[in-house]
Amino acid sequence: MATQSPFFGKRDRDTDSLTSRPAPLVGSGTNLSGTPVNPSSLTAQQGGLNAAAAPAVKEGGSKLTVGPNIKLKGVEITDCDTLVVEGLVEATMDSRLMQIAEQGAFKGSAEIDIAEIRGVFDGSLTVREKLVIHSTGKVTGKIRYGKIVIEEGGQISGEISFGAAKPSLQAAA
């Protein structure tokens, strides 16, 4: 006679310690014990990205994360404050902050305030403020930037130009 697995079916509330408190969501601001965590205190091992080098992200802003093994193709991304790429994105976008993880890749056109590249970017990239290419990052295509930081090992190639500041009102008139 087969016994029923405890993972399926009815659970006894008195003996089930997992239901006494809901599990915190990843990135919800709590650790596994349910204690609040200050995001600025995360280390590179805890937070994935180096928190010391990461620019401050305003709380409550819109954030899109494309996880590992996810492919997002043929889209226009709008009204997104932060884009985190851990999979593959083929898109056109205008955003405040873009972070491409080591295993991530972005192909297309992007206008960004701040970009941190640990993976691959291929296409047209305009960074209005600061472009950071980490040691594992590779950026190719038409690149414009305001400021640039390239770690040893980081790669950049293509048509590269300085001066990606927002256009002034006088230039538009």
Image (cartoon, rainbow, N blue to C red):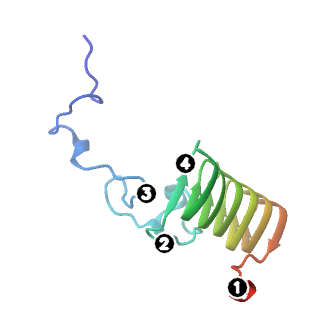
Distance from disc 3 to disc 4, alpha carbons, whole Å, reads 14 Å
Which residue matches tag 1? 168
Quadrant assignment, res 139? bottom right
Distance from disc 2 to disc 4, alpha carbons, whole Å, reads 21 Å
Residue drawn at 77 percent across, 70 percent down = 144
* Foreground disc of the pair 1, 2: 1
Earlier along the polypeptide chain: callout 2 or callout 4? 2
Earlier along the polypeptide chain: callout 4 or callout 1? 4
Q: Quadrant of the N terminus?
A: top left
Q: Amino acid at mark 4?
A: Gly
Q: Amino acid at mark 1?
A: Ser
Q: Amino acid at mark 3?
A: Gly
| Residue 112, percent from left and from top | 65, 68
Residue 50 in view in this figure: no
Q: Amino acid at mark 2?
A: Lys
Are discs 3 and 2 less than 8 Å apart at CB? Answer: no
Disc 2 secondary structure class: loop
Which residue matches tag 3? 27
Residue drawn at 30 percent across, 30 percent down = 7
Disc 4 secondary structure class: loop
Disc 3 secondary structure class: loop
* Foreground disc of the pair 3, 4: 4
Q: Pick whichever, 125 or 93, lies toward us.
A: 93
